[in-house]
Image (spheres, helix red, strand yellow):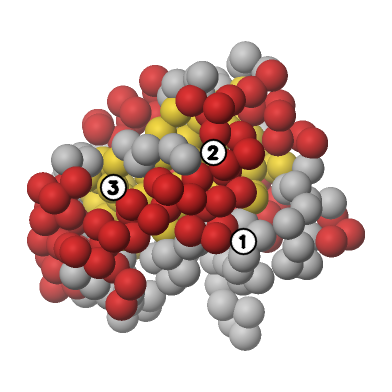
Amino acid sequence: MSYIPEELKNRMDSAKIVLVTGHYGSGKTEFAVNLALAYADSDRKMAIIDIDIVNPYFRSREKKNLFEEKGIRVITSAQTIQNADIPALPGDIYAAFDDPELFAIFDVGGDPVGARVLGRYSDMIKNVPHELFVVVNANRPQTATPEAAVSYIRAIEAACRIQATGIIDNTHLCGETTEEELAEGRELSSKVSELTGLPVVCHTAVRRLVSGVDPGDVFPIDIYMKKPWE
């Protein structure tokens, strides 16, 4: 299994459902994909559930073949309409609640409108061990200040009727990410944590920036989600 920071691992091990949300451009889908793949070698029965019905790009369902090769079940809208931006959600989602052995990672729409989809499942989610991670990127204007990030987190909570349980610092500038960017992300996420009382569960960094050093509280990630023109 890939390296997973202790705090993140503890939360993953104790949860049945992990919900990943974050603003468009935060990298929340990249984080969700890496998180699922990091657990592909574990003995847990796993599924990734793509309920992002807002953003037509960077959807975890795009890696369906890769997930299935790793033994991870993919639950999303019907294959024939998988690129349509319509609020069509599959009945298979209920497997996350009905199957006691299934561990599910939800890739949730990247704003309060997308998070509202969770509202219809909120009572069931609250009845099982769960985590709601909000991915924050200090380089996105909507979360570039602690106050803006807090406002965004509260809007997500109100939309889905579930309280956030942790912050994922995923500050990046795509291929231009530097160690300075990572330091700025740490500073921002620390302040957001102070204002909300939510823990910073982990920081992320592309693998090239943590190669050869002790990752500590950093979750090393690979880039799987390519831009449509790449």
Would you name the residue on which mark 1 appears? 59
Residue, x 37% and y 78% (percent of image)? 175
- At numbered mark 1, what does the secondary structure look like: helix, strand or loop? loop
**Residue annotated with mark 3:** 167
- Residue 195, above or below 207: above
First in sequence, mark 1 or 2: give its number.
Answer: 1
Type of amino acid at the residue the image marks with label 3: Ile
Q: How many marks?
A: 3
* Amino acid identity at mark 1: Arg
Crowding around mark 1 (Cα neighbors within 10 Å: few <14, some 14 to 19, many 20+) is many
Query: Residue 2 at x, y = what percent?
Result: 40, 40
Relative side of 162 to 33, left or right: left
Query: How far is the residue under mark 3 from the one under mark 1?
Result: 21 Å
Pick whichever of labels 2 and 3 is earlier in the sequence.
Answer: 2
| Spatial CA span between label 1 and label 2 | 13 Å
Identity, as a three-letter code, of the amino acid under mark 2: Ile
Give the residue displayed 22% in from the left and 41% down from the top: 198
174 relative to 169, above or below: below
Q: Farthest residue toward the bottom?
A: 229
Rendered residue at 71%/26% (across/down)? 95
Q: On residue 218, which mark appears?
A: none
Q: Compare residues 14 and 162 and report the one nearer the observer.
A: 162
SS type, badge 3 = strand
Give the mark, 3 or 1, whose residue is nearer the N terminus: 1
Task: Answer yes or no: is residue 70 visible.
Answer: no
